[in-house]
Image: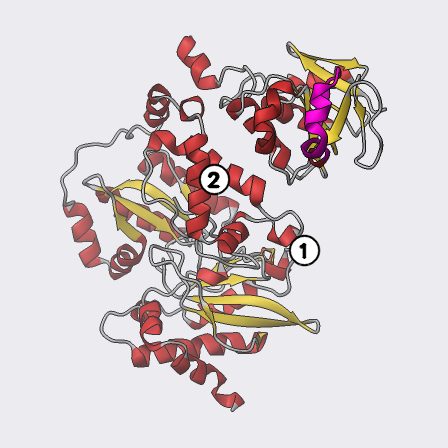
Amino acid sequence: MLVGGGLGRTPYLGPTIRRSLPARHLLSYLQAILRVYNRHGRRDNLWKARIKVLVASLGAEEFARQVEEEWDRTDKAAIDLPDTELARIRAAFAPLGFQTLPRVSTVFEAARSEDRGLARFVRNNVVAHKIQGYAIVKIALKAPGETPGDCSAEQMDIVADLAERYSLDEVRVAYEQNLILPHVRLDEIPGVYQTLLAAGLATPNINLISDIIACPGLDYCALANARAIPIAQDIARMFADPELAEDIGELKIKISGCINACGHHHVGHIGILGVDKKGEEFYQLSLGGSGEDDAALGQILGPALPADRVTAAVDNLVAVYLRERHGAERFVDTFRRTGLNPFKEAVYADAH
Amino acid sequence: MPTLIRWRDGAASTDADPFARVDDDVPLPEGDVIVSLARFQREGDLLLSQQRRVGVVVEAGEAVESLAYDLPQISVVALAFPKFRDGRSYSAAMVLRTRLAYAGEVRAVGDVLLEQAPFMIRCGFDAFEPADGTTSDQWTRAGHRFRHVYQRAADALTPAFAERGAQ
Ligand code: SF4
C-alpha cells in the first residue's frame, strides 16, 4: 500500500506503508487510511489539506502505525466485501474470446522483414501480449508538429473500426495521450498498420523523445502561466527524424503549463514547467524524474529559460547524453550516473 | 433557538429542543443542558448526579473517544461542523456508533447543510440543527436520495452486494 504520493505544488513519491494486504481487506484498510487522514489532516491551510502532507509531516512509519492501529479496531467483516462479491467483480474481467493461435505468425514475420516502416512501427509501438499470437498496438497521437493527444473525428472513426474488427472491440486511452488497441492478432498487424499509416496515425515514436506529454497550457487553460503545446511541437519537430529519435531511445518529456503539474513534469526524464516571470513565459527544466517502477522526482536543472531557448536546451541535453552514455543506457540512466553537472554546463554554457 | 430535526425510522420530523446549550462562562440553568467537552470534563460528575439529562458538544478537533466511559449516561453527543467541508465529525459519529456502541442522540451542529443529509445519516447522526433553514420534509427526501448503497455504515441499510446475493 503506497500512500501520500502526488505532484502539483508539493511533489512527493508515495512511501510504502504496507508490503502486502489480502485483496479481501482492501476496503477496510482504505477506510482506516482515510479515517486517519480525515481526523488528523491539516485544516488550517487549503494547500496543505492533502494526505501527502500528513504522511510527510508524520513520517511514513508513524502514519503506518496509526493506520494499523485504526485498522485493528475496525470491524473488518462489516466493511470488507464477502468472497462472493469479489468473485462477482472478478467475473466482469473474465478473459475475452481469445483464439488459440501459433506463437509465431508467418504472415507477420514476412511483412515486417519486407517493410522497414512496419519493422520500425513494430519495434516502437507494438508490445507483447500475454496471450500467444496476440499483440498490443499503441497508436501515438504524436505526429511531430501536431498537438500532443489530438485526434480528428475521422481518425477516431478509423480507430473505432479497427478496435471493433481487430481488437476484440476494445480501444483504451493512455495517460501518455495515446491510444491502445490491446488485443490484435499478429496476423492482422500488417493490415492494421497500413490503415493507421493511411490515416496519419502510424507515428512510430512511443516512449521516444517526440512522444511528449503536454498539458493544454496557456492555449486553453485558465490557470496556466505559459504555453505547453507549442513547446512540445517545437521539440518534436527538431527530433522528427525517426532514425535519430530511435538512436536517442527512450526519453520521456513531460510539460506542464503551471505548478499544478497536470503534465506530470516532475516525473519526466526531462520535465518542463511553465512559469511566469513578470508577465513573460519562462520554462524551468528538471531532469531524472520517472513515473514508472523506477519512480523518482526530477531535479531542477537551473534558472528558468525563455521560450525561444527551450528547444535548444533540450538539444544540448540530448547531445550530452549521446556523448556520455555507456552502452545501452537510457537518457535517465546516464543522468543518474553522471548527475546534473554535465547537463547543466551544456545548457548554461553561454551564460558564463 | 435553532430548529431541531430528528431522523427516526426513515423519516425526519421537526422537534422542540429540550436541551439548553450552555456556554462555558455562563452559570448552569435548571433542566437539560448541552455543555462543552472541557466543561463536561470539569463538572461532568456533578452534572450527571443531578436530576437532568446531559449532552456534550465535541468540537471537530476533539477526540470523541475521551467520552467513552461516560457515554451510557450521556443523552446527546453534539458533533460540530465548523465549516461544511470540515468532515472530521463524520469520523467521530462513525466511531461513536460502530466502535463505542453509543445508542443515544448524535446531533450535527454548526455548518450543517441539507446536501450532507444522506452522508450524516449513514454515519449515524439522528438529529440535526440545519444552518440553511431547510425543513424536515426536505430532510426526509434528502435522506432517501439514494436507494442503494455500496457499503455498510452506521445505519441499517443493506449494501448492494448483499441485496444481490439475496435475489
Ligand atoms: S498544469 Fe496548469 S496549465 Fe497545465 S492543464 Fe494543469 S492547471 Fe492548466
Give the labeled residue for mark 1: A222
Residue A137 on image: x %, y %: 32, 47
Q: Residues within 10 Å of mark 1 (few under 14, many from 20)?
A: few
Residue A46 on image: x %, y %: 65, 51
Letter of the chain that mark 1 sits on in the rendering = A
Residue A2 on image: x %, y %: 40, 47
Residue A6 appearing in the image: no
Q: Is residue B114 above or below residue A329?
A: above
Give the labeled residue for mark 2: A33
Task: Magenta stretch: give its range.
Answer: B39-56
Marker count (numbered): 2
Q: Nearer the viewer, residue B29 or A212?
A: B29
Label 2: state its secondary structure. helix
Residue A73 position by quadrant? top left
Mark 2 and mark 1 residues within 8 Å of each other at the beta carbon? no
Q: Is residue A214 above or below residue A1?
A: below
